[in-house]
Amino acid sequence: MKIDNAVPRLVSAAILLVLSLASVPVHAQDKPYTEGSVWNISMIRVKPGMFDVYMREVLPMRKKINEEAKKQGLLVSSHILSGNALGRDDWDVMFMDEYKNWAAFDGISAKYDAMMSKIVGSEDKQVQVMMKRTEVRDILGNKTMQEIVIK
């Protein structure tokens, strides 16, 4: 009789083991996406009537900085979106800078500081440029986000 009781227990244990092993691949399966590049996004509200003034000021300098950053392998791409703001607290210009991955940000401040000195000039000159921009735009926010690529 002990053998009769042992068989159902053994079968139950075997079934439990098989079921628990079968669930492992479900948890270990690949995610339905891969991690893509990392984006630094700036949301800007340009003051009414100042769009062209702002673009004439910011785009030539931004182009030089982005070209140098690409040459140094820091920046993958850069995009600018423009649209209507939905209210006083909404942005109408978005700057999107693409970086290869999170590791691209290691030591990036020093590299961009050197580029800014070369392209814009001294720290005092950089402050003057930034102060001038505050007359025509407000920065509503900055975000750094990673792209998710669907498999």
Image (spheres, rainbow, N blue to C red):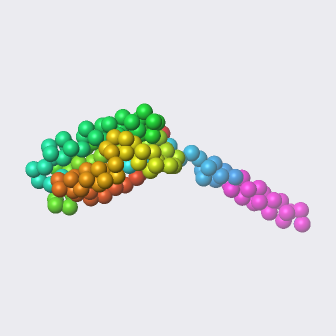
Residue sitting at x 16%, y 61%: 88
- Counting from the top left corner in percent of width and height, residue 79 is at 31, 40
- Counting from the top left corner in percent of width and height, residue 80 is at 27, 42
* Quadrant that contains the N terminus: bottom right
Q: How many marks?
A: 0
Horizontal arrangement in the rendering, residue 4 relative to residue 59 (left or right): right
Vertical side of 65 occupied by 130: above or below = below
Q: Please check the rendered image and state whether residue 6 is part of the magenta-colored stretch, yes or no.
A: yes
Residue situated in front as seen by the camera: 138 or 41? 138
Write down the quadrant of residue 82 in the picture: top left
Residue found at the very far right of the displayed protein: 2
Residue sitting at x 85%, y 63%: 6
Vertical side of 54 occupied by 14: above or below = below
The reply to whether residue 44 is visible in this rendering is no
Residue sitting at x 29%, y 50%: 125
Residue situated in front as seen by the camera: 82 or 13? 82
Horizontal arrangement in the rendering, residue 7 relative to residue 88 (left or right): right
- Counting from the top left corner in percent of width and height, residue 103 is at 52, 47
Vertical side of 68 occupied by 35: above or below = below
Horizontal arrangement in the rendering, residue 102 relative to residue 49 (left or right): right
Vertical side of 109 occupied by 72: above or below = above
Residue sitting at x 42%, y 45%: 114
Write down the quadrant of residue 61 in the picture: top left
Span colored in magenta: 2-20
Q: Please check the rendered image and state whether residue 19 is part of the magenta-colored stretch, yes or no.
A: yes
- Counting from the top left corner in percent of width and height, residue 92 is at 20, 50
